[in-house]
Amino acid sequence: MSRTFPWLLFSAGLGVLLWGREGAVVPVAGQSAPNAGADGPGRVVVDYVDGADPAEIAALEARHGLVLDWASPVSEDEALRVGAASDVDDLLVALRSEALVEVAEPEIMMAALEFPDDPLYAKQWNFQAIGAARGWAAGAGRGVVVAVLDTGVSAYADLPAERLLPGRSFVPGTDSPEDDHGHGTHVASTIAEATNNGVGATGLAFSATILPMKVLGSSGSGATAGIAAAIDDAVDQGAQVINLSLGGGHSDILLLAVAKARAAGVVVVAAAGNTGREGLGSPANAMEVLAVSAVGPDDTLAPYSTWGQGVELAAPGGDLRRSGGGILQGVVRNGSVDYQAFQGTSMASPHVAAAAAVLIAAGAQSADEVERCLKRGAEAREDPLRYGAGRLSVAGALDQLLLQRHGLRFAAGVLLTAGLSSLARLGLAAASVTSLVGGFLAGGLFFLPYLLDPEVGATTTTIARPLLAWPGPAWGGFPLWQSALLPFLIGFVVGPSLRLGFLGLACAGGVATSLLFGAATGAVDVWWVSGGFEQAWLSLNGTLALLIGMAVAGFQSMGRKTA
Amino acid sequence: MSFRGILQWRGLEGGYWALVSASEELVLLGDVPRQLDGRSVVVEGSLDEGFNIFMAGRSVKVRSVRAE
């Protein structure tokens, strides 16, 4: 058992991993629906009573005018036949009354799930280039508020009103934050356009919430005071990210507003400008802003993009000189919805704002951490004046977050569990396996996204996280989950066993590490417990988990002596 | 103020009209008659000190545009 267990564990993990990378099998809309219960031609599948005489089956089918075949070469034993029928509904009623028939139903076409199913996604080269799928798998910015300071934002079918907060207008003479130009809606759609709804295009952080702040009028221009006031208001309204796809001359008031927003922990992203020359304008040149230059589909700086000192990242902004080279999103103009390809650093900026939302939703704790992950995860370029830290990579940024947040936990989990294994007097091989399992439970397989291509599945993303973060926001904060209960139960069941006791040690070591890390960093949100009590809960339970591990180690040590 | 140059459409940020002269390219904010595309024009307006989505240099709030 002791030799085979690691292989079983490895095989199980590999199985789960592969399952996570395969698309789930679901009925395909448009294929299954017309056939399911259709009053007309279609296909039926009939399961006859096992052992039914083929001659009786043939006679029955002849009576109903059916010409069916065995569903597969091996289905003769199961008496499963399938074929075309002229009137599915009536035929099924008749077949179900036959004693020879166990089940008769319409044949439902199944296919691997395509994600996303938005028809224009194939033309969104920009999202494919930056690894948007990783961001979607990591929560797509769920629960994060992104303020879009622009020409306003208009809801439409693919950017539904529930994705938008009420918003506000800072343009004199205009009360509504509705978009009367089209630019702001395009920018907001890059961030939060509904995804996998079978309509239009996708959004990079489609689960984020947009706070529309209209600061520019129908001509696309606006005044400094309104923009500064909107930044202040966005912070007050809880925005975690602010996107500024706008620019102009120097303004101390605007710079002060940006500095205050950043000091409040808000990530502020701005377009570098469209002069095609060196030298950033305001607010992109502010220290506290993430200034974004634009690249085209060939991944080189777009000819219109401003560059120079202060550019921190590059992101897709489009290049309409190339066929299909624009950034395609939904736009509302004069009340009508259209999907249009734009180009400009205004299009690059919301890519970074959306990526910031993805990181925050995935667990980044501060604006500093978001910026660090974005920069370190970017695809490096040799020209920092044009590309800053490099071209945005959502996949790379998430990898950085995983490494920073979970890599250390993994190492600590290994060390703590190795200590418990030593107390238990485990042999070298058993202690090594136990320590690795402890590290896995503490930090997850944080390195998996490095090893796999960017299109990792949800299961892979889950096991790349610590055990206590596996349930996600739905259950992860439940106090009994964030406690010593699990190591107590596992330790109680397997602790005395010399064969399985290592599981108790690993669980105690991994969970103790996670809980104590949570107490130290404040990164864990425990329900119904707040402030210092949250840290006290985590510290107490982390200590208890450690004590449980020591108790299991004691059992193991004594058992080995006796044996 | 009067500004002289050739009227040209720019496909940036959803599109805008630019007034192109030997010394500078100005972003035109406001209504511009599209039938003057490519023509030498005189733009009456004022330099805009605010912020805009075009970020392509100095901008002019247009009062009127006429062919030169």
Image (tube, rainbow, N blue to C red):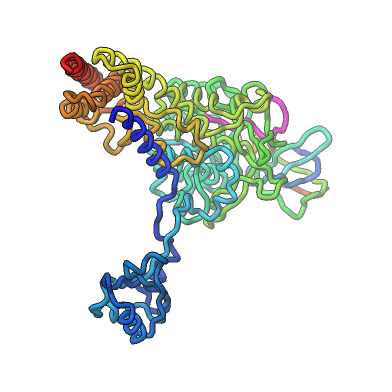
Question: What residue occupies the far bottom of the structure in this picture?
Answer: A63
Please identify the quarter of the rendering in which residue B18 is found.
top right
Locate the C terminus of chain A and report the quarter of the image it occupies.
top left
In the rendered image, the vertical position of residue A174 relative to residue B33, given as above or below: above
**Nearest to the observer: residue B1 or residue A155:** A155
Taking the image as shown, residue A184 lies to the left or right of residue B59, namely left
* Residue A483 visible somewhere in the drawing: no
Query: What secondary structure prevails in the magenta region?
Result: loop
Q: Residue at x 40, y 77 (%)?
A: A68
Taking the image as shown, residue A239 lies to the left or right of residue A385, namely left
Q: Is residue A273 magenta?
A: yes
Please identify the quarter of the rendering in which residue A10 is found.
top left
Q: Which residues are magenta?
A: A269-279
Q: Residue at x 39, y 41 (%)?
A: A15
From the top left corner, tell me how far across and down residue A192 is, in percent.
47, 43
**Nearest to the observer: residue A447 or residue A328:** A447
Please identify the quarter of the rendering in which residue A79 is found.
bottom left
Q: Is residue A271 magenta?
A: yes
From the top left corner, tell me how far across and down residue A369 is, in percent.
45, 23
In the rendered image, the vertical position of residue A306 relative to residue A426, given as above or below: below
Q: Residue at x 40, y 19 (%)?
A: A408
* Residue A75 visible somewhere in the drawing: yes
